[in-house]
Each structure stands twice: as C-alpha cells, then as structure tokens.
Image (cartoon, rainbow, N blue to C red):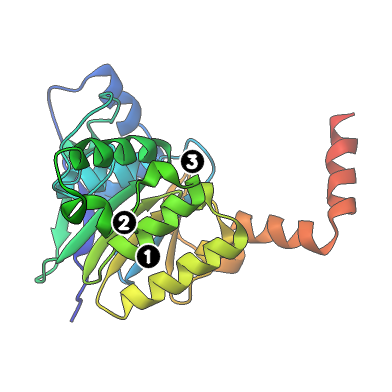
Amino acid sequence: MNTLYINRIERIERLQGISEQASYYLALPAVRALDKGLALHSPVTILAGENGTGKSTLLEAIAVNYGFNPEGGTRNFNFASAQTHSGLYRDIRLIKGIKRPLDGFFLRAESFYNVATELDRLDEAYPDDLKLNRYYGGKSLHHQSHGESFLALMLNRFSGQGLYLLDEPEAALSPSRQLTLLAQMHHLLEQGSQFIIATHSPILMGYPGAEIFWLDEEGIRPVDYKETEHYILTRKFLNDPKSLLRYLWDEKE
C-alpha cells in the first residue's frame, strides 16, 4: 500500500481565465507534462534540472495547493511580503494518500528571511517561556548564520510524520552540512515522513532510494542518479578540474 501523503500530481484543464502570467508557466514543458500525471513512488522525490525549467514553480504550486504559505513556513503561517507566487497551484490536482501528515513545512531558500522575520514578529507577543523560537532551537533565526538557521529549523522544528517541501535547501549549506541534512532526513523518514525537494545539489540527489525527476525542454522524466548532469559534471570536475577548466577556457577563446 502506498503510504505517501502525496501520491500523484495532475494538471487541470482550465478553459478560461488564463492570464498572461498563467500562459507563461502553463507553457513550461514540465507543466504540460502533468497532463499525463506524475506519480510519486518514493518518500523522497527530487526535482532536478537546469535553471528556468520550472522546478521551484512546480514545488511552490504543490505547497500552496496543499495549504502552505507561498513564502514558506507551516500551514499555520499567513503572511505575505510580496505577492510573487504563480497561479499554477490552481491548475494542478494533488492525489493524496489515505493518511494525513501530523507535521509539515515549506522551506524556500529565497524567502526564508521573511519566515524568520515573521517568527520574530509573532514572538513579540509571547513571554520567554512561550516563544515560538523554542521550536526552532531556542533563539531567533536572525541571530544565526543563514546555514545555522536552516539546520536549526530542520533539526528542531521538523518532528516526523510530516510532509516537507524544500526548495534549494543547499543554498546556505556547506557540503558537510548537506550531509547533516541527509542524516536528519533519514531520521524523519524512519518516522513516516515524505520529502519533495527541488535541488541542484548532487549530494542531496544521492539519498538512497530517492526518485529523481529531470525537468527540461522535453518535460519531466525519471532519471538515474548517475545519469544526472549534476553528478556527471561534478565527477568530471573532481576527477580532473584542470582539464575541465582548460576546456571551458579554450571554448571561450
């Protein structure tokens, strides 16, 4: 039996009310591919591909459709610094599992600052022993480095049996901290969690058993970890950085 919280993503055909913005994202090959549906089989789903292929747009749509705040946070967050999210969430249908998550969080690197600011704002009304930051490591996320605040969130706030949607979480993390994230993911997965991650990191893509979907001009397709461009280029660079860089420099001349 499939125990995932989200089993499938489908696009809904909308015949009217298509704005100029909607016509842009609906034209993305990855979005058009959802006409056939995208079935999820693993508790770890990776959305990978080049910039501009729709990874973050799709993840954002999944999050907002599920009820998360567009800028990030839990389903209880209700703030907006700027209305910049797309309307794709209205054009998709999420086929959910029979179980409902007890926890959840939408983490997007580009607006995590806004989430931290909202937490500080909410905490102004509470005494020290009731402040929300006790769930995030005990101190303001703004009083930590970007990477430390990311890890404080993942190590302290994520409690298991949850749906966690992460948009480029590697943005603030060193390679060693990305390994720490993988270890925490494993712990949370053992507690019945599900992760959907948009990432460029070959380290995060390497989680054992992760289902990787490659987004490009052809649409969306499953791909083996060692067939991803991220893995291939990283391996080539680490094996012989001088030769790869010389090739790039010669190509520019």
Does the rendering let one see residue 32? no
Q: Position of residue 42 (x, y in %)?
A: 33, 72
At label 1, the amino acid type is Leu
Q: Which residue is mark 1?
A: 155
Q: Nearer the viewer, mark 1 or mark 2?
A: 2
Between discs 1 and 2, the one toward the N terminus: 2
Q: As rendered, which of 161 and 138 lies closer to the eye?
A: 138
Between discs 3 and 2, the one toward the N terminus: 2
User: Is 236 situated left or right of 66 in this image?
Assistant: right
- The answer to the question of whether label 1 and label 2 lie on touching residues, with beta carbons closer than 8 A, is no
Q: CA distance from mark 3 to mark 2?
A: 39 Å
Q: Position of residue 199 (x, y in %)?
A: 48, 52
Q: What residue lies at 35% left-to-right and 51% top-to-bottom?
A: 139
At numbered mark 3, what does the secondary structure look like: helix, strand or loop? Answer: loop
At label 3, the amino acid type is Glu
At numbered mark 2, what does the secondary structure look like: helix, strand or loop? Answer: loop
Q: Position of residue 150 (x, y in %)?
A: 42, 52
- The answer to the question of whether label 1 and label 3 lie on touching residues, with beta carbons closer than 8 A, is no
Q: Which residue is mark 2?
A: 136
Between discs 1 and 3, the one toward the N terminus: 1
Q: Identify the disc placed on residue 217.
A: 3
Q: As rendered, which of 167 and 159 lies closer to the eye?
A: 159
Neighbor class of circle 3 (other Cα within 10 Å; few <14, some 14-19, many 20+) is few
Quadrant assignment for the C terminus: top right
Q: Nearer the viewer, mark 1 or mark 3?
A: 1
Does the rendering let one see residue 230? yes
At label 2, the amino acid type is Tyr
